[in-house]
Image: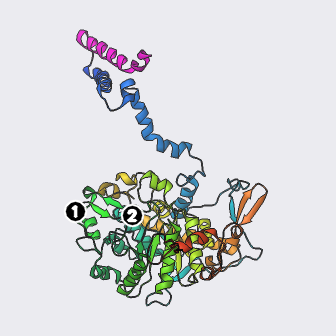
Amino acid sequence: MHSRRYLAVMASALVLIGALALAIIGPFHWLWILPAAALTLLGTYDLLQTRHAVLRNYPIWGHLRYFFEFIRPEIRQYFVEDENEQTPFSRKQRSIVYQRAKGENESRPFGTDLDVMADNYEWVGHSLAPTKLAGSDFRVTVGAGRDQPYAISVYNISAMSFGSLSANAIQALNQGAAMGKFAHDTGEGSISPYHRAGGGDLIWELGSGYFGCRNEDGSFSPERFVEQACTEQVKMIEIKLSQGAKPGHGGVLPKAKISREIALTRGVSMGQDCISPASHSEFSTPVGLLEFVERLRTLSGGKPTGFKLCVGHPWEFFAIAKAMLQTGITPDFIVVDGAEGGTGAAPMEFSDHVGTPLQEGLLLVHNTLVGIGLRDRIRIGASGKVITAFDIARTLALGADWCNAARGFMFAVGCIQAQKCHTDRCPTGVATQDAARQKALVVPDKAERVYRFHHNTLHALQELVQAAGLQHPCDLGPQHIVRRVSSHEVKRLSELLGYLEPGELLTDGPCRLEVFNRYWPLASAESFQQVYSQPQAA
């Protein structure tokens, strides 16, 4: 057994000895000695090093393990992966983005490759009287009645910061958004020159670091906020409470990765780590959150203002709802980020096991607003693996007014799901600050692809809406989506998922959904903590 494990190093040593002997006694080129010498030295190092047990037991051979481990993701993606296996996005999903972005034929021959008899298979119920719509530029108005309402597309670019994405990627995304007249969320890294260069509509996201509108101590600066928010390109203001990739987790951008451009964009020093705290310093209660919403709305000149969150404890969102009723202050919109979202690198535990998935989070937010009678005043955006027109249709049917996508638009600018985003070695120049790698991403070409992906996806959505016999995607409801629950039974989502009646939470009676019966009484507008009633003294 020992001879097998050490065969490679023993053979290398023997070859080296033989080569040296031949070189001494006869005409033998010294270059032939080098491979044997290199392998012998490598094997000797493997035997003496103390870090890797595999290499000590299998000198030279052990390196094959690390080589195959290194190329495993590529082997799996290109040769092993199933067409519909979503880890995190299937080849089929990526392909439809590439085809639509390039304007290629996206039709599939020979029928579906999905198992229509499998549990959880879903489809849109079609009508015998389909409609004919004039176009696919579907929009909803956010902030109706405010000084500067915004007609937002039903499909937009989700939050991705400059620093996470390259300058070229940001510029291509924004130029594409300008061409298609849809919105581009800045991410919490503030508004960079590359967001401005394209001229596309911006949703400015404010995270807990208040980047782009902060004082030197990291606190919020109203003056700097006004400078940015009142520009024509900024259409909406979004406070980030949490994100699907790592809800409840702050972030650190190491000082080594902070370039001069990033420092100027975020308003931070190059000589220290850039900290994004897990919570905001401007408020600590639900009432405080809404007062901050109102403050930003006033400072921005009446632009639609709201917040984004990945739903966690239900009583915390119920507390925000009660604060709306108590103060009369309402956000113009709420963006629900599903836990399946994930452009931000995060610890495995947070990516896999923290946060509410989009369906459940969206339903909770939608039902709460319906239950308190404010759904008509507050728009809901939704994000979390929304790639195809069916994804949009299904999300709108659940209760959203519009959808955002991050990774879908990353695919449009060239992302190949190499999952190297956190290493600064993105092979396509999308998620890197390496100047040489960024050059591979040609902005005009990728901007055109962003535009085409959006345009062709909305065209597909138009065809779905027409097939369902409707006039607008917002006419979709849970009754239009059908799910197989067993081999012999299907149900509409309106039968499977619970929905409240308008004003139901304002009555004294029990609610039809248990989550509200259990946690609504525990919520307070004055705190994000559960509030228990005190037992009365005898």
Residue 201 seen:
no
Can residue 238 be seen from the camera position used here?
yes
Rendered view: 412 above or below 203: above
| Frontmost residue, 21 versus 70 | 70
Circle nearer the N terminus (2, 1): 2
Compare residues 505 and 428 and report the one nearer the observer. 505
Dividing the image into 4 quarters, which one contains the C terminus? bottom right
Q: Tell me if residue 253 comes above or below residue 131 in the rendering.
A: above
* Front-most of residues 134 and 127: 127
- Extreme residue in the left direction: 271
Q: Main secondary structure of the magenta part?
A: helix
Relative placement, left or right, of 222 versus 8 is left
**Residue 177 rendering spot, x and y as whole percentages:** 45, 73
Q: Tell me where residue 242 sits by quadrant.
A: bottom left
* Residue where numbered disc 2 is placed: 169
Residue 534's disc is none
Q: Label 1 sits on what residue type?
A: Met
Label 2 residue SS: helix
Instruction: Please give the range of residues in magenta.
Output: 1-28
Q: Is residue 297 a member of the stretch shown in magenta?
A: no
Residue 366, placed above or below residue 52: below
In which quadrant will I find the N terminus? top left
Secondary structure beneath dot 1 equals loop
Q: Amino acid at mark 2?
A: Ala
- Neighbour tally class for label 1: few under 14, some 14-19, many 20 plus, Cα within 10 Å: some
Q: Label 1, on which residue?
A: 270
Q: How is the image coloured?
A: rainbow
**Residue 225, percent across and down?**
31, 79
Q: Is residue 403 left or right of residue 269?
A: right
Q: Position of residue 88 (x, y in %)?
A: 52, 54
